[in-house]
Image (cartoon, grey):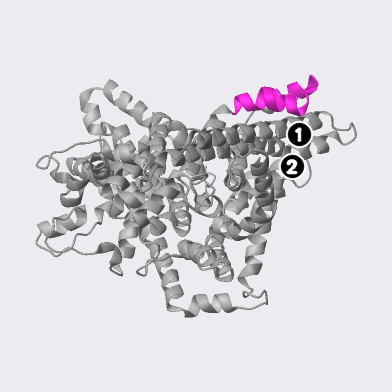
C-alpha cells in the first residue's frame, strides 16, 4: 500500500479494482432482470456524465496518436480532427524518428536501447537487495528491529531533490575514475556508462521495495518457517526455497511498478546520465526535442508515442499487478 | 547508433548483471559460513548489509548534507542568504505561491472527479473499460503527458488554421486564439490540468475499491428509508470511504509537491510557472546555485514531513498490534 496507507486499506489483498468489477458484472447477469434494475444505482444522467468524462480523458492522447500518422505538411496546417476532409496517413514520421541516420533526426533507436537497459537492471538490483532486507526484518528477531524498520519506511518520503546534489558529488569523485578505467580496458564501453543511473535508481527504490515486500513476507505463516528451521535449514536456504517462491506476487507487483517508474523517469536521468546517446533514456530525448524542435509536431508526436507505448503495453497486459504496485508506490520519489 | 555502440550497451548490461550476481552469491556464501557464535546476528547483518549500505550512502548522508548546504553560502560560510532569497525575491515568492496553488487544486479536483466517476460507473455495464480509460494516463510518463497537452494548447498566429484543440474550440466560438502557455496566470492552471488528468485515475481506482467495500445492507437500508441518491451518497457512501479519501488526498498532495517533469517539459518554468521541485533543479543544476537548490529541497521536505509523521504513527500502532 502507499506510504500513506492507513490500517484500513489492506495491502496485498486485491484492492477490488478489476476483479471485483468482473465479479459484480457476472453477478448482475445472473440475477433476474427486475432485481438488476432495482440494484443499479446509476441513472441516465450518471451514465452520460461518466461518458463525457471518459471521452474528455481520451481525446488528448487520441489526438496525438492520430497526428503521429499524418504527413508533416498536414499536421502543420490542419487540425487532426479534420482528418477525414484532409485525408492522409503515413508511416514516415515513425521511420524518421527511428531509422533515419541524418544528423538532424531524433535517432531514437539508441535511446530506446538505453531505456530498456536502464529499466531492466534498475529493477533487478533493488528487488534482490530489498527482498533480502525484507526477509531479515520479518523473520530474524533482534533488538531495535522496529525502530530500524520505521526509519526505512520514513525514508520513502525523502524527496529525491534532497539527495541529488550530494549524490552527484559522491558519484563524480568515486565512480568517475572507475568508469574511465573501465573505458581504458574495454574501449567498446563508453566513458559515460549506465553505472550512475543504475545505482541512483536502485538507491531511491529501496525504501519502498523493502516496505512492500516486508508486508508480504511477514504474512507467511510462521509454522512454515519454524518447521524448516527445526529441520536444520539455514537462513539462506529458507530465503531461497521458501520465502522467494511464496513472495512471487508481491515481487511481480513491485517489479512492474519499478520498471514503469524507471522507464518514465526524467529527473534522475537528467542529473546522472550525462544526456548523450550513450546513456540518456527516451524520456530525456523527448524532453530535449520539445525544447529544440518544438514546432516539428510530426517528430514530437511519433517520438512521444514510441515512448508511451511500452508502459502502455505493460499496463494493459499486466494491469492487475500494476495497479497493486502503483497503489503501493504512488508516493515514491 | 553503430553496431559497436549496441554491442557496448549489451556488454554493459550483461557485465553489470554478472557482477551483481557474483556479489550476491559471495554474500550468501559468507552468510552460510557465519561463525557459530552469534550466528543469527551475522546472518542478519549479511541480509541487511547491501540495502542499508545503499540507503545510508545514497539517502541518509545526502539528506543531511543537503540540509547543511541550505544554510551555507557559496564560500561555505554559515548564512541565511538562501532563505532570505527565497522569501524576498519576487520570482522565488512566485514559485512558492504556485506550489501552494498546485497543492490546493490538484488533489481537490482529481479526487472529486475520481470519486464522481467511481460512483457513476459503479456496477454499470463495461465498468472495466470505463476504468481503464481513466486510468491509462497513469502509465504515461509525465514527459509524454507534457507533449500530449502541449499539442492541445498549441497556438497559431494570425488567420492560420489552429492545430491545437483548445484554440480551435475558442476560434469556433468566435474568440481570439490565445498563447496559452505564455499567458500568466492561465498557464499555471493549464499545467495543473495536466497533473489532474494524470492523477484522477489513481483516485478513481482507490475510491472505487473502497465503495465496493461498503456493505450493501447499508445502502439497501437507506433505500428502504426512502432516501434519494444524493442523500445516500452523502450519508452512507462518503462516511464509508473516509479512510480511502484521506489516502487519496495525501498521496496526490505528495505527488503534486514533487512534480517536476510536467513543468520542465511544457514551459521549463518560464512565464511565471515555476514550482519548488522545478526551481530546485534549475537553481542547483542549471544556475549552479547549490545553496538555493538545497534550501528549496529542504522546503519541499518540510512540506511533506507532517504527512510522513502521521503515517509513521499509524505504522507504529500497526506493528505494536502484531
Mark 1 touches mark 2? (CB < 8 Å) = yes
Secondary structure state at the residue bearing disc 1: helix
Asked whether, in this view, residue A102 is left or right of residue A229, the answer is left
Q: Please tell me the numbered disc located at residue B49.
A: 2
Asked whether, in this view, residue B138 is left or right of residue A147, the answer is left
Check disc 1 and report the residue beneath it.
Answer: B27
| Circle 1 chain | B
Look at the image and give the residue range highlighted in magenta: A224-247
Name above or below for residue B63 compared with residue A189.
below
Name the residue nearer the viewer: B171 or B115. Answer: B171
| Residue A213 found in image quarter | top right
Predominant secondary structure, magenta span: helix
Q: Is residue B131 visible?
A: yes
Name the residue nearer the viewer: B293 or A18. Answer: B293
Instruction: Please tell me whether residue A244 belongs to the stretch shown in magenta.
Output: yes
Residue at 44% from the left image edge and 37% from the top image edge: A323
- For disc 2, the neighbor class at 10 Å (few under 14, some 14 to 19, many from 20) is some
Residue B313: % across, % down: 61, 53
Distance CA(mark 1)–CA(mark 2): 9 Å
Residue at 66% from the left image edge and 38% from the top image edge: A129
Residue B254: % across, % down: 48, 56
Name the residue nearer the viewer: A328 or B249. Answer: A328
Residue at 29% from the left image edge and 26% from the top image edge: A28
Asked whether, in this view, residue B9 is left or right of residue B255, the answer is right
Amino acid at each position: 500500500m502507499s506510504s500513506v496507507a492507513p490500517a484500513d486499506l489492506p495491502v496485498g489483498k486485491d484492492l477490488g479494482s478489476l476483479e471485483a468489477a468482473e465479479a459484480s458484472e457476472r453477478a448482475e447477469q445472473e440475477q433476474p432482470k427486475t432485481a438488476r434494475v432495482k440494484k443499479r444505482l446509476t441513472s441516465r444522467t450518471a451514465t452520460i456524465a461518466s461518458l463525457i468524462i471518459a471521452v474528455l480523458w481520451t481525446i488528448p492522447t487520441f489526438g496525438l496518436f492520430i497526428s503521429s500518422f499524418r504527413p508533416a505538411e498536414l499536421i502543420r496546417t490542419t487540425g487532426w480532427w479534420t482528418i477525414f476532409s484532409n485525408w492522409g496517413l503515413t508511416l514516415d514520421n515513425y521511420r524518421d524518428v527511428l531509422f533515419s541516420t541524418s544528423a538532424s533526426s531524433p535517432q531514437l533507436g539508441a535511446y530506446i536501447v538505453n531505456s530498456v537497459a536502464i529499466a531492466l537492471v534498475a529493477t533487478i538490483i533493488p528487488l534482490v537487495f530489498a527482498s533480502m532486507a525484507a526477509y531479515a526484518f520479518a523473520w530474524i528477531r533482534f533488538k531495535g528491529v522496529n525502530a530500524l524498520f520505521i526509519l526505512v519506511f520514513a525514508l520513502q518520503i525523502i524527496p529525491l531533490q534532497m539527495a541529488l546534489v550530494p549524490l552527484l558529488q559522491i558519484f563524480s569523485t568515486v565512480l568517475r575514475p572507475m568508469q574511465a578505467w573501465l573505458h581504458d580496458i574495454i574501449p567498446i564501453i563508453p566513458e559515460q556508462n549506465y553505472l550512475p543511473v543504475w545505482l541512483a535508481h536502485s538507491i531511491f527504490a529501496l525504501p519502498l521495495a523493502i516496505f512492500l515486500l516486508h508486508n508480504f513476507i511477514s504474512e507467511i505463516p510462521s509454522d512454515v518457517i519454524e518447521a524448516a528451521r527445526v529441520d536444520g535449514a539455514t537462513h539462506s536456504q529458507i530465503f531461497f526455497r521458501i520465502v522467494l517462491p511464496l513472495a512471487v506476487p508481491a515481487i511481480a507487483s513491485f517489479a512492474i511498478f519499478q520498471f514503469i517508474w524507471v522507464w518514465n523517469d526524467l529527473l534522475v536521468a537528467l542529473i546522472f546520465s550525462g544526456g548523450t546517446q550513450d546513456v540518456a533514456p527516451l524520456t530525456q530525448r523527448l524532453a530535449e526535442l520539445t525544447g529544440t524542435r518544438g514546432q516539428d509536431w510530426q517528430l514530437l508526436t511519433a517520438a512521444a508515442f514510441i515512448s508511451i507505448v511500452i508502459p502502455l503495453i505493460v499496463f494493459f497486459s499486466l494491469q492487475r499487478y500494476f495497479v497493486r504496485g502503483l497503489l503501493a508506490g504512488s508516493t515514491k520519489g | 547508433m553503430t553496431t559497436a555502440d549496441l554491442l557496448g550497451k549489451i556488454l554493459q548490461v550483461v557485465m553489470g548483471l554478472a557482477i551483481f550476481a557474483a556479489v550476491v552469491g559471495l554474500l550468501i556464501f559468507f552468510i552460510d559460513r557465519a561463525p557459530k557464535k552469534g550466528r543469527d546476528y551475522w546472518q542478519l547483518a549479511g541480509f541487511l548489509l547491501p540495502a542499508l549500505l545503499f540507503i545510508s550512502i545514497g539517502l541518509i548522508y545526502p539528506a543531511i548534507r543537503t540540509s547543511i548546504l541550505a544554510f551555507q553560502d557559496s564560500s561555505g560560510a554559515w548564512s541565511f542568504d538562501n532563505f532570505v532569497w527565497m522569501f524576498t525575491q519576487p520570482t522565488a515568492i512566485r514559485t512558492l505561491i504556485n506550489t501552494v496553488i498546485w497543492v490546493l487544486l490538484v488533489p481537490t479536483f482529481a479526487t472529486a472527479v475520481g470519486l464522481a466517476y467511481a460512483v457513476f460507473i459503479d456496477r454499470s455495464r463495461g465498468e472495466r473499460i470505463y476504468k481503464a480509460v481513466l486510468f491509462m494516463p497513469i502509465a504515461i510518463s509525465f514527459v509524454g503527458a507534457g507533449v500530449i497537452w502541449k499539442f492541445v494548447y498549441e497556438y497559431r498566429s494570425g488567420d492560420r488554421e489552429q492545430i491545437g484543440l483548445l484554440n480551435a474550440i475558442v476560434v469556433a466560438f468566435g474568440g481570439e486564439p490565445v498563447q496559452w502557455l505564455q499567458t500568466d496566470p492561465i498557464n499555471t492552471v493549464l499545467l495543473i490540468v495536466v497533473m489532474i488528468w494524470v492523477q484522477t485515475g489513481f483516485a478513481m481506482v482507490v475510491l472505487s475499491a473502497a465503495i465496493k467495500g461498503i456493505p450493501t445492507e447499508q445502502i439497501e437500508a437507506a433505500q428502504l428509508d426512502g432516501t434519494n441518491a444524493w442523500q445516500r451518497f452523502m450519508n452512507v457512501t462518503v462516511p464509508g470511504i473516509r479512510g480511502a479519501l484521506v489516502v487519496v488526498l495525501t498521496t496526490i498532495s505528495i505527488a503534486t509537491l514533487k512534480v517536476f517533469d510536467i513543468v520542465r517539459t511544457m514551459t521549463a518554468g518560464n512565464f511565471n510557472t515555476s514550482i519548488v521541485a522545478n526551481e530546485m533543479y534549475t537553481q542547483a543544476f542549471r544556475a549552479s546555485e547549490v545553496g538555493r537548490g538545497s534550501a528549496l529541497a529542504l522546503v519541499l521536505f518540510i512540506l511533506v514531513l507532517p504527512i510522513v509523521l502521521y503515517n509513521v504513527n499509524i505504522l507504529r500502532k500497526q506493528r505494536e498490534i502484531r
